[in-house]
Image (spheres, grey):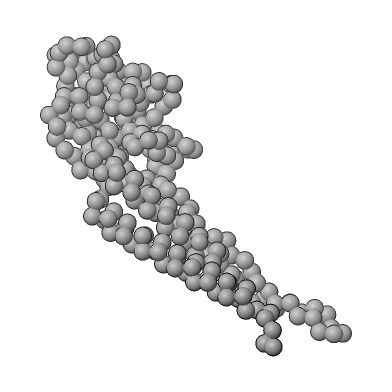
Amino acid sequence: MYAATSGALVAQSAVDTIANNLANVNTAGFKRTLLQVQAQRSTQLYRFQTDPGNAAAQQPIGALGSGAEVYDTPADFAQGAIASTGNDLDVALSGPGFFATRDGNGALGYTRNGEFSLDQNGTLTAQNGDKVLDANGSPIVLPLTGKAVIDRSGAITVDGQTVGQLGLTEFTNLSALRPQGSNRFVVSGNAGARPATTTTSLQGSIEKSNADVVRSMVDLIANERWFEANQKSIQTQDTANAQAVQTVGRSSN
């Protein structure tokens, strides 16, 4: 019963994860979440037998598994499709890099969502309001008038004058990036941040979510069936226990 319960809980976590991926299928820069499952720690069983006049005998029987559990929920950083928008402040990234941002509390974050805009002071901001940083870690400020041009290296010019450089960052250990919200990531552990060398900027485009609708729907159905199978196993065990309680020890007279 406990093994089936653990399986049902894992299936429920999988359904929640897949549902979140489906909900963000139209979120720019979204990276789908994976679910890694592992077996729970097993318990070694022994048979103990004591005969009159003899020492207790211990005989190993084998390991008893106790079910499954969620090991981790990492993000899949595969490149999403690039779609043209025609907006001068929309920037898509081709390659493994990220835009560096800073929120209102000063916390550093990273995103692949390049749907940028200017606030009332001309500061380049991400869709969630975070300030977009340059190569030196400072907010990028643009003139409120003039045509902005962003080249493939991330250099920004307005009416021919260089005004900034997107601070593109790559990581040697992507597993140290943890999602915070729908398309923002924060560093947890040693991520090996470094200036981007293999990432290019594409102005007037955005990177779409890498969530696969068809695959997610198939996985959703499979995990719902997995949950139902574990649920039926729990019900069967519960019925057997109820019958045992009613019948064991009952006198035949």
Q: Residue at x 44, y 21 (%)?
A: 105
Q: Is residue 100 visible?
A: yes
Q: Nearer the viewer, residue 7 or 107?
A: 7
Q: Residue at x 54, y 69 (%)?
A: 238
Q: Is residue 16 left or right of residue 48?
A: left
Q: Residue at x 40, y 38 (%)?
A: 179
Query: Which quadrant would the N terminus be assigned to in this image?
Result: bottom right
Q: Nearer the viewer, residue 18 or 179?
A: 18
113 over 161 or under it: above or below: below
182 over 238 or under it: above or below: above
Query: Which quadrant would the C terminus be assigned to in this image?
Result: bottom right
Q: Is residue 95 visible?
A: no
Q: Is residue 251 left or right of residue 115?
A: right
In the current view of this chain or complex, which residue is farthest to the front?
253
> In the image, residue 38 lies at what x, y percent?
48, 59
Q: Residue at x 29, y 22 (%)?
A: 125
183 over 118 or under it: above or below: below
> In the image, residue 146 lies at what x, y percent?
15, 13
Q: Nearer the viewer, residue 111 or 47?
A: 47
In the current view of this chain or complex, which residue is farthest to the right?
53
Which quarter of the picture shows residue 10?
bottom left
State how many labels appear: 0
Q: Is residue 206 left or right of residue 134?
A: left
> In the image, residue 37 lies at what x, y percent?
45, 57
In the current view of this chain or complex, which residue is farthest to the left?
86
> In the image, residue 210 lies at what x, y percent?
26, 45
157 over 4 or under it: above or below: above
